[in-house]
């Protein structure tokens, strides 16, 4: 049994991953900000606001993995995005991750096989209209991933997953009709929208010893969008 911290475990990808790890017999420490969730079985939930002072004293003395899930999807023309909006996304997605990593680093170092998983987006390396606000913060996450992978090797592996549009509450406004779902599905070579489980499966693999020779990678789980042009 291993101990995992999932920041943002009350919905979407974080929830799917927490449930998967718990079913595998691991102890999961999940956090939520605005979606209170009751602890059950191998999953314990704790409130956490990553933009404020954080108390992570609920964690055990040793942590084997950290997954940082908080994010946002705000699609607007560049000229309409206020500076404050860029800063808010950066605080949530980048500074929040940095703060958590710095706090848990001592207990991650106690593990013989620690793994850290962050989240980027296909839009960073592919480039899409109206994705500036999303891509700026997630681009920073990709830089953070590679830098930490170099600094923490060989004791802690660090990787990021770059999904395409995934059917989660975060993307609800973009997928709130059958027509939107079908149109977005057709943009992908595999002709469907990704599910939370699709992404959680990859995160669980990166946490596991099956990925023990993988670090510093940006893993594209995007239905082929970043690699295939049709």
Image (cartoon, helix red, strand yellow):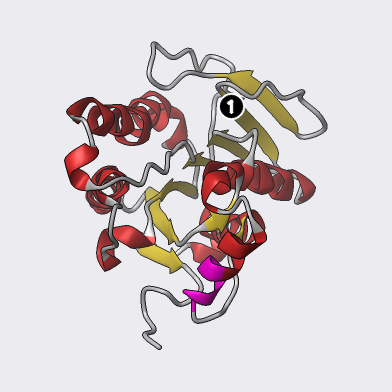
Residue 7, how many percent across, how many down?
A: 52, 33
Q: Residue at x 58, y 46 (%)?
A: 172
- Residue 185 magenta: yes
The magenta stretch is 183-188
Quadrant placement of the C terminus: bottom left
Residue 19, how many percent across, how many down?
A: 73, 44
SS majority, magenta: helix
Q: Return the residue nearer the eye: 195 or 53.
A: 195
Q: Residues within 10 Å of mark 1 (few under 14, many from 20)?
A: many
Q: Return the residue nearer the eye: 156 or 227.
A: 227
**Corner quadrant of residue 93:** top left
Residue 174, how many percent across, how many down?
A: 52, 51
**Corner quadrant of residue 214:** bottom left
Q: Return the residue nearer the eye: 180 or 149.
A: 180
Is 66 on the left-hand or right-hand side of 217? Answer: right
Q: How many marks?
A: 1
Residue 125 vertical placement versus 224 (above, below)? above
Q: Residue at x 27, y 30 (%)?
A: 85
Q: Is residue 10 visible?
A: yes
Quadrant placement of the N terminus: top right
Q: Is residue 203 visible?
A: no
- Residue 154 magenta: no
Q: Residue at x 76, y 25 (%)?
A: 39
What kind of element bears circle 1? strand
Q: Furthest residue to the right?
A: 41
Q: Residue at x 24, y 28 (%)?
A: 87
Q: Return the residue nearer the eye: 122 or 39.
A: 122
Residue 85 vertical placement versus 76 (above, below)? above
**Corner quadrant of residue 228:** bottom left
User: Residue beneath label 1, please?
Assistant: 31
Residue 5 vertical placement versus 173 (above, below)? above
């Amino acid at each position: 049994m291993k101990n995992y911290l999932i920041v943002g475990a009350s919905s979407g990808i974080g929830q799917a991953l927490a449930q998967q790890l718990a079913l595998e017999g691991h102890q999961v420490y999940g956090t939520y900000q605005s979606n209170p969730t009751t602890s059950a079985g191998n999953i314990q939930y704790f409130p956490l606001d990553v933009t404020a002072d954080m108390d992570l004293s609920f964690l055990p003395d040793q942590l084997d993995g950290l997954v940082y899930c908080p994010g946002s999807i705000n699609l607007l023309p560049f000229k309409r995005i206020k500076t404050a909006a860029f800063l808010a996304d950066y605080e949530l997605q980048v500074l929040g991750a940095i703060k958590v990593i710095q706090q848990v680093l001592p207990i991650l170092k106690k593990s013989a096989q620690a793994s850290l998983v962050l989240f980027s987006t296909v839009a960073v390396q592919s480039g899409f209209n109206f994705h500036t606000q999303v891509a700026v913060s997630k681009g920073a996450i990709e830089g953070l991933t590679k830098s930490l992978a170099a600094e923490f090797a060989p004791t802690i592996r660090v990787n990021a997953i770059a999904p395409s549009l995934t059917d989660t509450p975060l993307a609800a406004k973009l997928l709130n009709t059958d027509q939107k779902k079908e149109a977005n599905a057709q943009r992908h070579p595999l002709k469907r929208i990704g599910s939370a489980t699709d992404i959680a499966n990859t995160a669980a693999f990166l946490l596991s010893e099956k990925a023990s020779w993988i670090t510093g990678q940006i893993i594209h789980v995007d239905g082929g969008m970043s690699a295939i042009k049709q």
